[in-house]
Image (cartoon, grey):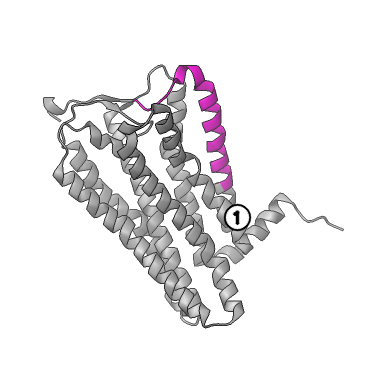
Amino acid sequence: MDEDFNITYLIFGGYVEVEKYKYAYFVTVFFTYMLIICSNSTIICLICIHRNLHEPMYIFIAALLVNSVLYSTVVYPKLLIDFLSEKQVISYSACLFQYFMFYVLVASEFLLLAAMAYDRYVSICKPLQYPTIMRKTTVTVLLVLAWLVPLCELTLAVILIDNERFCRFTLPSIFCNNSILKLHCVPSRATTIYGIVLLINLGFFPVVFILFTYTRILIITYRSSPEVRKKAAQTCLPHLLVLINIFLLITYNVVIVRLEADMPKTAFLIMTLQLVLYHPLFNPIIYGLKMTEIYVHLKNLLCPPKLN
């Protein structure tokens, strides 16, 4: 970067009375982070250990939970450091990296949910062809694409942001998200247009595909036996709940960035924390309680059957 772009550090301006409540902030976030790590890791380990869970559906679930752990790790360690620091700052390069990884992992979740929807469609609507279609190679390709496509597309977004001139250096947030765009001297048309393209490619298209897929499943199972309808409900409902959760998360993120200037700082902090507190805990709860096979193994782990 030349002299016009010589940025070293950015300041997080979204914190409220950090010095007064730093230990309360730290303890709350630390235990939440530990709970996220433990709950997601438990389900992942159960899927890895038990052979009857070595199926495409459960492999996708494990990938989704790994995604949740990575999503939390992008944000939580930096939050914990900031709570105990005199100044809440971040280097410019680290901020770009956090922004990049945050949205890569959010986008990956949409693509993983799309892969899971396709898996459920083949399993329920084309059961005889399922072993042929959902082979190990297919699952591997879908997993790689779910992470590789967002990585490639978000790389260009970061390059566009990096090429803009900054006139402000205080982020109105507690981590690097879309609020970084407000630091530009002049809103970039290229960045805005590419942001819309990203939203369509990584958000709109996967959601439309998922809704279309589950609509097809609903139509086919409606004409089938009660057993088929029950199986479809048991396996598809958790995926739909997670989809609704992540969709609301993205909508919420866009809304709070837009409303930041029109709301009290405390309210904005509370709303921002919702982005990283609830979502990573939601997935293991849903899949641990709603997926019968996982629930059985989880129950045996937490409450081992007594030996006579």
**Magenta-colored segment: predominant secondary structure:** helix
Report which residue position mark 1 lands on.
Answer: 288
Query: Is 253 rendered above or below residue 139?
Result: above
**Magenta-drawn segment:** 13-39
Q: What is the quadrant of residue 276 in the picture? A: top left
Identify the residue at horizontal 44%, vertical 57% (top origin): 243
Please check the rendered image and state whether residue 187 is part of the magenta-colored stretch, yes or no.
no
Identify the residue at horizontal 49%, vertical 66% (top origin): 56
Q: Nearer the viewer, residue 247 or 308?
A: 247
Residue 209 left/right relative to 240: left
Residue 171 left/right relative to 72: left
Q: What is the quadrant of residue 77 in the picture? A: top left
Q: Position of residue 103 (x, y in %)?
A: 34, 46
The three-letter amino acid code for the residue at tag 1 is Gly
Q: Nearer the viewer, residue 187 or 259?
A: 259
Q: Quadrant of the C terminus?
A: bottom right
Please check the rendered image and state whether residue 17 is part of the magenta-colored stretch, yes or no.
yes
Q: Position of residue 235 (x, y in %)?
A: 55, 66
Q: Identify the residue at the far right of this view.
A: 308
Identify the residue at horizontal 51%, vertical 66% (top origin): 236
Query: Is 244 rendered above or below residue 165?
Result: below
Q: Position of residue 198 (x, y in %)?
A: 26, 53
Residue 104 appears in the picture as rendered = yes
Q: Position of residue 104 (x, y in %)?
A: 34, 48
Q: Nearer the viewer, residue 115 or 192?
A: 192
